[in-house]
């Protein structure tokens, strides 16, 4: 009963007891309204079978259902592949408002006044043409390695979380995490992680204090980013690769001052957009490689094949261990692409949310405006019709294709990052993940660097247990230890 130790489950249970009247009956929907999911049914699955909760609810209530949440509102759900194109392409579903309803006052922009998506996309494209991008990433990996004692980490997920944050600071904002300013940012940003805040009890029983603390942290971050910009901007050139200066220049006002609110919001948004799933996916793949010798061998052999095709082939183990991949070589790592996509499919329990801006319908069912519409990813990604034996990790599986070009099937990751509506791992339709290419470059660079240099061995030999979780990718309930054994020369 892992869920019982989870704070969201405790909160849900408290709400259940406080709402006996709600639990005692299931409202009868109007003729054009979707069926109601009894709160008792959701709570029962939450406590007894949380991993399969969304799959079972989808099987019982698809394609559309509604859930009355006491003291909150009614949330509408669309389940399974049949609803994927509707959910991901419908113009009346507002992604930003959905995010703001979730993060609320725990973000620097609770009213969604500024859409950072386009600016994030522009900065991703800028970073990917930086010839030093992968070298900077590899340098941060080397720093991480020096902290391991005898090649052992007792907390792989924790180490990779820190690594990803440091890479993002360096590659996106040109901020060295070893400087006092970089260290301060690293200490502040996790404190305003909206996912962590939402999963904490204080967000509910001491909400005003948490809101105040977040506002104070955002004010300090705003001052810090603005000061760094004003220190650097006077000496920069039009050809600068300093990400913070490039962002600040975009927000210069007629009086010469930078819009420090937009600068803060963009910096904060990118840090979390580039952090949460990137570190979890990377950590899980490294854990799987450490657990499965066959998978490790296939990943390593692909690396050997790619680096052997250089103009001056990299053939010795010694040379292979220190080689720095180019962005072009990252694009040739097709098997690793499939590994990453399959890991997100298997390890992602998340539910994405959109705010309904105008009245909608799906089939015979009405979905009224000013409500939240949710799409539980497991109801599609763990659908046995699409993915036989769905919880088995298999990077070679072929997925039925549901795109806009008439194709009928595709391998994992084929059809483009955002082309197969049966696979929502990188976003789809009107809201694809604008940082996907950077996230892939980051994950591939780190995994490639570690796999070419080390053989990985998982402590205990068993994949870690999964806790109850409603958001992002599953994180293990306990720390994951891995031993990195340096490969011998051949």
Image (cartoon, helix red, strand yellow):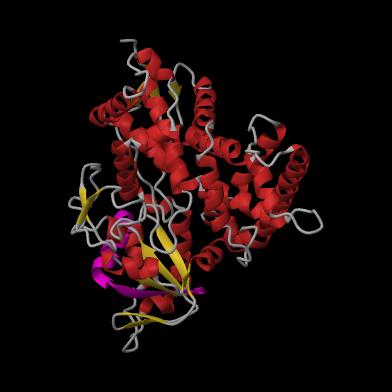
Q: Quadrant of residue 262?
A: bottom right
Give the image location of residue 224, x and y in percent: 73, 44
- At x 29%, y 83%, the residue is 364
Measuring from the top left, give residue 358's x and y in whole percent: 47, 80
Q: Nearer the viewer, residue 321 or 247?
A: 247
The quarter of the displayed image where residue 460 is located: top left
Q: Position of residue 14 (x, y in %)?
A: 47, 65
Numbered range of the magenta stretch: 48-73
Is residue 485 visible to the viewer in this orientation of the structure? no
Say above or below: 209 vs 178. Answer: below
Residue found 41% across the figure and 56% down from its top: 470
Figure check: 166 above or below 10: above
Q: Magenta includes 328?
A: no
Please indicate whether residue 367 sits to the left or right of residue 413 in the image: right
Q: Quadrant of the C terminus?
A: top left
211 or 159: nearer the viewer: 159
Does residue 30 appear left or right of residue 163 in this picture?
A: left
Compared to residue 280, the image places residue 43 above or below, namely below
Count of numbered badges drawn on the protein: 0
Answer left or right for 147 relative to 437. Answer: right
Residue found at the very far top of the displayed protein: 489
What residue is at 66 percent from the left and 59 percent from the top?
A: 211
Pick the residue in front: 291 or 246: 246
- Can residue 466 be seen in the rendering of this structure? yes
Identify which residue is drawn at 63% across, 42% down: 243
Q: Residue 428: percent from the left, percent from the top?
A: 38, 59
Q: Is residue 134 left or right of residue 422?
A: right
Query: Is residue 72 shown in magenta?
Result: yes
């Amino acid at each position: 009963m892992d869920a019982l130790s989870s704070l969201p489950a405790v909160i849900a249970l408290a709400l259940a007891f406080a709402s006996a009247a709600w639990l005692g009956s299931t409202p009868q929907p109007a003729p054009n309204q979707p069926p109601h999911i009894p709160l008792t049914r959701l709570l029962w699955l939450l406590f007894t079978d949380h991993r399969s909760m969304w799959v079972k609810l989808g099987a019982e209530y698809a394609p559309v259902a509604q859930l009355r949440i006491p003291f909150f509102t009614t949330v509408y759900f669309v389940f399974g592949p049949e609803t994927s194109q509707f959910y991901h392409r419908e113009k009346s579903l507002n992604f930003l408002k959905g995010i703001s309803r979730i993060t609320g006052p725990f973000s620097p922009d609770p009213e969604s006044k500024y859409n950072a998506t386009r600016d994030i996309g522009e900065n991703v494209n800028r970073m990917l043409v930086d010839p030093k991008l992968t070298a900077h990433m590899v340098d941060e990996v080397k720093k991480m390695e020096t902290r391991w004692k005898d090649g052992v980490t007792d907390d792989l997920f924790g180490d990779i979380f820190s690594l990803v944050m440091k890479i993002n600071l360096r590659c996106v904002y040109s901020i060295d995490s070893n400087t006092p300013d970089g260290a301060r940012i690293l200490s502040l940003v996790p404190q305003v992680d909206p996912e962590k805040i939402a999963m904490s009890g204080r967000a509910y029983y001491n909400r005003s204090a948490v809101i105040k603390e977040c506002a104070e942290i955002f004010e300090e971050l705003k001052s810090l980013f603005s000061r760094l910009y004003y220190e650097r901007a006077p000496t920069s050139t039009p050809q600068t690769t300093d990400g913070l200066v490039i962002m600040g220049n975009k927000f210069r006002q007629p009086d010469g001052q930078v819009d420090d609110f937009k600068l803060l919001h963009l910096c904060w948004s990118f840090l979390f957009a580039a952090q949460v799933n990137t570190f979890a996916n990377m950590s899980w793949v490294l854990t799987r490689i450490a657990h499965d010798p066959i998978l490790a061998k296939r990943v390593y052999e692909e690396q050997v094949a790619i680096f052997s095709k250089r103009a001056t082939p990299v053939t010795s183990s010694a040379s292979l261990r220190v080689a720095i991949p180019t962005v072009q070589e990252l694009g040739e790592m097709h098997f690793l692409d499939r590994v990453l996509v399959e890991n997100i499919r298997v390890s992602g329990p998340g539910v994405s949310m959109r705010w309904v801006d105008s009245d909608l319908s799906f089939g015979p069912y009405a979905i009224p405006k000013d409500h939240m519409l949710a799409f539980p990813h497991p109801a599609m990604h763990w659908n046995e019709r699409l993915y036989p034996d769905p919880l088995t990790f298999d990077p070679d599986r072929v997925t039925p294709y549901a795109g806009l070009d008439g194709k009928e099937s595709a391998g994992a990751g084929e059809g483009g990052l955002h082309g197969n509506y049966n696979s929502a791992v990188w976003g789809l339709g009107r809201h694809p993940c604008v940082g996907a290419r950077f996230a892939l470059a980051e994950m591939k660079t780190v995994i490639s660097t570690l796999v070419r240099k080390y053989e990985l061995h998982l402590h205990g030999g068993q994949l870690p247990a999964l806790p109850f979780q409603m958001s992002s990718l599953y994180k293990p309930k306990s720390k994951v230890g891995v031993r990195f054994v340096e490969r011998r020369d051949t």
